[in-house]
Image: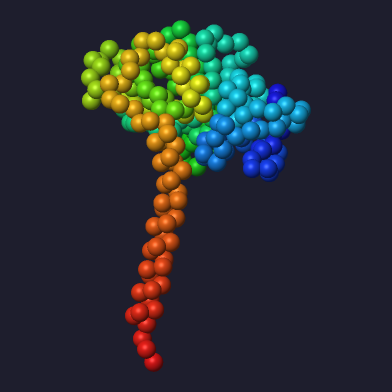
Amino acid sequence: MDLLAYHVLHEGRRMGPYDRRTIIGLRIKNTLNGEHLLEASDGSRLTVAQLIGRPSPAGDFNAMRSGSYTSAKHTCSASLVDSESGPVEIPAFRGEVEVRVHSDVLRIAGTHRGGLGRGLKDGRVKLPLKDIVHARTAGSRVDLWLRSGDAPAAANKLQRFALDLFSDESAGELLQWLPDAKPWPQAAPTPSAAKDNASVSPLLWAAVVGIALVAAIVLLVVLRPRF
């Protein structure tokens, strides 16, 4: 079990301590990025991307684990950021998920809402590698397109879902374990554009709200009855 705690070092400040799960949660919410520097309680330093890129400690993440042994060829952490409805039922995983590449399937395990007020429960989905037709990366994001069984791989019949691997390197490494997935024929958004949009959007919304409030106040003053 990983008992280490981590402080975030940012602009001369030392924030924390946080455990690994909290760091991942902050990364998923884009409060932290992969380049943020951490200082562990044992004195070592590493980036958020390096921490998340490590295998999850057995006591830190155990969704649907059957034991310490696994036949997976590759294991990594991710978060589910988008999922289209389709013939393959992919649970609406929340927070960190564990991704394993086996010889014939891509296994995703994590927690999701059970419905009817049952709270969170463990779940998993196994996707045959032969059904992953296309793949595309944009920074740390990986989009995958699935076909249903032996159905033709027509673009309008494919089911898409997307994972955030938390770092560009992890995203590229996952695709190396999916050699049969062909590149998506349409151009991918550039990582820099995606990051810019993620950082600008909150500021843009704040500006819009501020302008709307000022306009409402001015209108109220103008239309106020004069006594």
Specify the farthest residue to the front: 12
Q: Position of residue 135 (x, y in %)?
A: 36, 20
Q: Position of residue 164 (x, y in %)?
A: 47, 29
Q: Looking at the picture, how far across and down is residue 216, in whole percent?
A: 38, 70
Q: Nearer the viewer, residue 192 or 166?
A: 192
Frontmost residue, 122 versus 183? 183
Q: Residue at x 36, y 10 (%)?
A: 180
Asked if residue 227 lies left or right of residue 42, the reply is left
* Residue at the extreme right: 42
Q: Position of residue 212 (x, y in %)?
A: 38, 63
Instruction: Specify whether residue 138 is in view.
Output: yes
**Residue 45 vs residue 171, the one in the foreground:** 45
Q: What's the residue at 62%, 14% (across, down)?
A: 67
Query: Would you place residue 190 above or below residue 126 in this image?
Result: below
Which of the 4 image quadrants contains residue 163? top left
- At 60% from the left and 25% from the top, the residue drawn is 50
